[in-house]
Amino acid sequence: MSAEAKRYGRYAAVGFFALLLVYYCVHPAMYAEGEREIFILASQKTYIAMAIVFSLIALALTPVALDGRVNRILSWIWYTLAPFAVYFSLLYLNADKFNIDFFALNRIALGFTFLFLFLLEALFLIVTGSIRWSVVFLAVLVGALGIANCFVIQFRGMALSAGDLFSLGAAASVASEYTYELDWYMYVEVLLTAAICALSLKLSGGRMLHPAVRAAVLVVWAAVAGAYYYVCCKTDFLEEHEIRSEGFTHQLRYKQYDMIFTTLTTCFYLSVDKPDGYSVERVRELAAPYLEEEGTEAAIYSGEGETEGTPHLIVIMNESFADYTDIGRGLELSEDCMPFLHSLTENTIKGNAYVSIFGGNTPNSEYEFLTGNTMGFLPPSSVGFNLFVRGNLPSVASELKREGYRTLAIHPYRGTNYRRHIVYPQLGFDTYYTRKEFEHPQYIRSFISDAALADRIIEEFDKNKESGAPLFSYNVTVQNHGDYFASNTKNLDLSIEVKNPEVNQTKTSIYVNLIRESDRMLETLVRHFEQEEEPTVIVMFGDHQANLGDNTYEYLIGNEEELTAEERMEKYKVPFVIWANYDIEEEVIERTSLNYLYSLLADRLELPMTGYQRYLLALSEKIPALCAQGYWGDDGIFYELDDAESPYYEAVNEYNILEYNDILGGKNRYLDFFSEVKG
């Protein structure tokens, strides 16, 4: 590199470092004390920021002319120390946020963490042949991961995991709907990462350019990396040392394993192991009673003329739809945010369903409802649509399609999110409409409103009348999607007030007013179909709760670290409602889960059911609710899925056997059980 290029590089670095200090100065939240803003020079943080930035500027401006041998020695010393510098810069970011005490961390996990960082650094060295660039890439990658993780937790309440790698497109599509602002810890992570990079770039020695040397190092690297993978993924070493990755709130384990290794462990469990006792013969044995069972004959479309009593089915999975007046202590509102749903009693079945997700990964709730499979037997934080629909998969849609229904899916947002444009046809949907098919819809905030979707549901229903076939209209809303910030309330009536000062007022106030719009959507549909002569059923349920801030949940249910597994289930409770425009028996179901919901619906309304759905209906009587966090037995006790002492352990394993066959049975999938309607 020429002297002139180096000079311009130094000036660019100085400009970047100066901008970092300007960023600090124009963001008072950086140096505020809690909620109280103070004078910038009265904060100790200001002097820390100034010291680091001015040191970086001095480093950038100071030419370094070391002897070649000295440069090489210092480069290799820095190469050895850099993973520790990278680790401790990230530890500062996470320590206060997640109560991490370095000296209390699991020593085995810590060893695996540093080995992973050295492996990553070595890989960059093999690829680039340069020590300084291998350190720069390591520092930037880890720093960016740490900051991204903080934003993800802030937005959805769950930490990053390996499963998120398969959802990058969906994440990118909604990224613009959030506000991003560094806090003090993220800011220091940027400063420390910049310092590591600046120091690395000052050292020009330590190259590994000879192809034979790099090839030899690559062989050694592959052997060490292979051993690392084998121990972590192919043995019980981690479990034997009580290092686990189960669960969805990964950040709760940061104080045990740190952020890097906790995130890494989610990569070790992306595959699905065969359940105990699995065989094709065992699947057939478990399925047999439900293939032979005789049930009430459902009224099915004959393919000619009118629907002959077969009800149209309109399902709405409503984004972030939850009743926060019924979660933990409950929010106190100036007025009810879902008065219509609460008032529904006639020809209505409603209650609470427990879901496997919190704050995000919406398609996992779709997956459970449509297939009857639970995410509880699948890798923690994986996304069902991304990993476990790789070809035609039996579902409610494919079943109803075989019975003469027209199957329609509508999601007024980007159609490619979570591979829906690929997955929906594989699940049996004839048609899929996205936001592209909405002309001049009403928006609330930056999303198509629930009211606009209700209009489209009615429009498509009327169009379908010409076919004479019953309609299965499956709809996923987007109006209530996070984030909930004050500058994004366009077209939203904010007249409902939250009367609990302890909670995040901005997020909760916006949220409950959005839910009122969803309640109005339900009322619009019910009022319309009350006048409809053809039998019609409307189902609405939430996909997950919203992330309304740690202080909100601490007020509602308490400090999550101190809660029992059953108490944490309050974060996974959503309402559901089933309404028909003809006489059905009213019912309140206090506790179910989305994998059971269609079976319960079909049982009460005499809709078609497969053998698998009959099995799920019977299982729901013994285990009323089952999701990724655990289950309740009919004894009223909550159990975790891996509790071998549970009296329901064998029943849960049998469910796992059947689900495994459905998802991964391949040519041995028992299609008669999963696809054929029995009645």
Image (cartoon, helix red, strand yellow):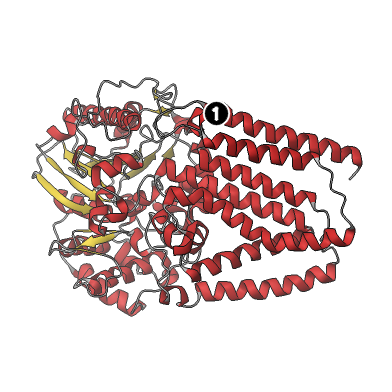
- The total of numbered circles placed on residues is 1
Q: Where is residue 73 drawn, in percent x and y?
A: 81, 63
Q: Is residue 397 left or right of residue 556?
A: right
Of 609 and 452, the residue lying toward us: 452
Residue 615: % across, % down = 22, 64
- Examine the rendering and report whether any part of residue 207 can be seen: no
Q: In the visual, does 225 lie left or right of 37?
A: right
Residue 547 horizontal/vertical position (percent): 36, 41
- Quadrant hosting residue 532: top left
Please determine whether, in this image, residue 345 is positioned above or below residue 158: above
Q: Which residue occupies 32% across, 40% down?
A: 551
Disc 1 residue type (three-letter): Leu
Q: Is residue 141 above or below residue 613?
A: above
* Residue at screen point 37% across, 41% down: 408
Would residue 98 be found to the left or right of residue 340 on screen? right
Q: Is residue 60 above or below residue 518?
A: below
Q: Quadrant of the N terminus?
A: top right
Nearest to the observer: residue 31 or residue 437:
31
Tag 1 residue: 41
Q: On screen, 447 above or below 94? A: above
**Image quarter (top left, top right, bottom left or bottom right) of the C terminus:** bottom left
Query: Within 10 Å of the Cα at label 1, are there few (<14), some (14-19), or many (20+) other Cα atoms?
Result: few
How far from the left and from the top, in percent, is residue 606?
Answer: 16, 51
Q: Nearer the viewer, residue 598 or 534?
A: 598
Residue 389: tell me if it is visible: yes
Element type at marker 1?
A: helix
- The structure residue drawn at horizontal position 66% and vertical position 76%, both measured from the top left corner, is 223
Tell which of 218 and 49 is nearer to you: 49
Write the residue at 42% across / 25% down. 488
